[in-house]
Image (cartoon, grey):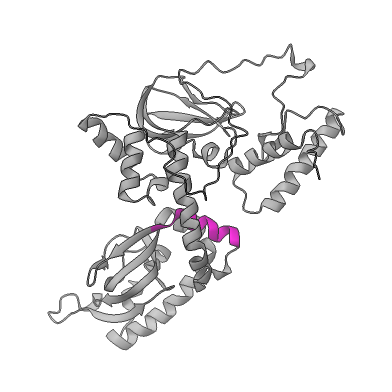
């Protein structure tokens, strides 16, 4: 049986996909209803019904929305004041819209590895620029080393277009220094200031660039080619999803989340391993992440702050955490230093969520965590005669 794809369907869905990637809606169905309703209304106002030419764009939350386009200008636009962006100094690859890529394939060594030689000074600067890039945090040491080998340095000047909205994705970029405007349909919607990364969406989802990035001053970028990015980053994320999605579904705290929300958590998870007796967090330290025990056991120890000057103020065990349980959340919920220390009992493997992802993805779980504070305080009263350790 042959199936014929209706004319305009591909362009229609591409326009919607670009907006999903740009807007990051929490509910895809509601977003789709709004998107296509406004698209229909815009066509009605323009007098272009079924069979008419696709519209150029519609307004969405005050911003022009990218919609389906066949890449050809309407006759009415011949005399418009539209000026194309200045040509980029960066080479562009040919179209990849029909390129097939399956991150679940295991043939990751079929393509030759890319290596751009670097001086020791360059590699040190590159490592520092990549230190806080979330996409790299799930890579093992060998994979991270391959990424660093494959990256190459790009110098930019004011008004240089690093990427252009609607273009095919060629590289992923990490900012070493410089200020870059984020423009959507000609409107500045944000800015990168001497840190951050961009360009991953077009490479991960095989869609056109969702925005234009323009340098506002002289700066320096590190670029990772498309093939290496997909071989290492995309495949690694796919493997991580397969590995952790079932485990995440079994964590009681996360059962209240939607499936799509849990998948977002899987995408930002890191992993840390600890040896027997190793201290994992220290009481009084600033909180930077939240832990879920994947294997092993963790004991939570605390010294009483009300007895800080006492010579006999030894650490007391207040709890143990095993597979599927979590710790380290209290400091993130209360915005206070770590209330206790944690030690590995035997070899321990934990999944880690950093504080930024915690705030962004686990907001709906905070009330559950706050309810646990009362339980913690009861334990402190039994152990120390006071619960002031949490309130102070």
Res 311 → quadrant: bottom left
Q: Can residue 131 be seen in this view?
A: no
Please tell me whether residue 204 is drawn above or below residue 11 in the rendered image: below
**Image coordinates for residue 368, horizontal then vertical, percent:** 51, 72
Residue found at x 30% / y 77% = 299
Residue found at x 44% / y 24% = 216
Counting every numbered tag in the picture gives 0
**Who is closer to the viewer here, 377 or 10?**
10
Q: Viewed as shown, does residue 11 lie left or right of 268?
A: right
Q: Can residue 211 be seen in this view?
A: yes
**Image coordinates for residue 135, horizontal then vertical, percent:** 42, 46
Res 303 → quadrant: bottom left
Q: Does the magenta stretch include residue 263?
A: yes
Q: Can you say which quadrant of the picture contains the N terminus?
A: top right
Please tell me whether residue 287 is drawn above or below residue 215 in the rendered image: below
Please tell me whether residue 371 is drawn above or below residue 329 in the rendered image: below
Q: Viewed as shown, does residue 79 lie left or right of 270?
A: right
Q: Does the magenta stretch include residue 103?
A: no
Residue found at x 30% / y 63% = 273
Mostly what secondary structure, the magenta segment?
helix
Residue segment shown in magenta: 259-270
The residue furthest left is 311
**Who is closer to the viewer here, 322 or 38?**
322
């Amino acid at each position: 049986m042959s199936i014929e794809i209706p004319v305009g369907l591909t362009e229609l869905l591409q326009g919607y996909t670009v907006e999903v990637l740009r807007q990051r809606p929490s509910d895809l169905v509601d977003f789709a209803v709004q998107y296509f309703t406004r698209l229909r209304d815009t066509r009605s106002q323009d007098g272009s019904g079924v069979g008419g030419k696709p519209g150029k764009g519609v307004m969405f939350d005050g911003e022009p929305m990218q919609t389906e386009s066949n890449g050809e200008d309407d006759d009415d636009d011949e005399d418009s004041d539209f000026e194309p962006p200045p040509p980029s100094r960066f080479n562009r690859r040919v179209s990849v819209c029909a390129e097939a890529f399956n991150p679940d394939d295991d043939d990751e060594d079929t393509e030759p590895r890319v290596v751009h030689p670097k001086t020791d000074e360059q590699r040190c600067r590159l490592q520092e620029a990549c230190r806080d890039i979330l996409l790299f945090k799930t890579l093992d040491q060998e994979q991270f080393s391959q990424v660093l080998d494959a990256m190459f340095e790009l110098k930019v000047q004011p008004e240089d277009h690093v990427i252009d909205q609607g273009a095919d994705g060629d590289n992923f970029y990490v900012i070493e220094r410089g200020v870059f405007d984020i423009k959507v349909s000609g409107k500045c919607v944000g800015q990168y200031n001497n840190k951050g990364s961009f360009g991953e969406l077009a490479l991960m989802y095989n869609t056109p660039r969702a925005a234009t990035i323009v340098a506002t001053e002289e700066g320096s970028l590190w670029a990772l080619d498309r093939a290496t990015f997909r071989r290492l980053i995309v495949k690694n994320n796919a493997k991580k999803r397969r590995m952790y999605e079932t485990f995440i579904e079994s964590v009681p705290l996360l059962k209240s989340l939607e499936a799509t929300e849990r998948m977002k958590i899987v995408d930002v998870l890191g992993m840390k391993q600890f040896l027997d007796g190793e201290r994992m967090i220290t009481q009084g330290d600033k909180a930077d992440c939240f832990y879920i025990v994947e294997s092993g056991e963790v004991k939570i120890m605390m010294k009483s702050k009300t007895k800080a000057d006492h010579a006999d103020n030894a650490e007391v065990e207040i709890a143990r955490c095993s597979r599927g349980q979590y710790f380290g959340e209290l400091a993130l919920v209360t915005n206070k230093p770590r209330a206790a220390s944690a030690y590995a009992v035997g070899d321990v493997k934990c999944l880690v969520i950093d504080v930024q992802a915690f705030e962004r993805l686990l907001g709906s779980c905070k009330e559950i965590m706050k309810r646990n504070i009362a339980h913690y305080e009861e334990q402190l009263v039994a152990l120390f005669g006071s619960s002031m350790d949490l309130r102070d």
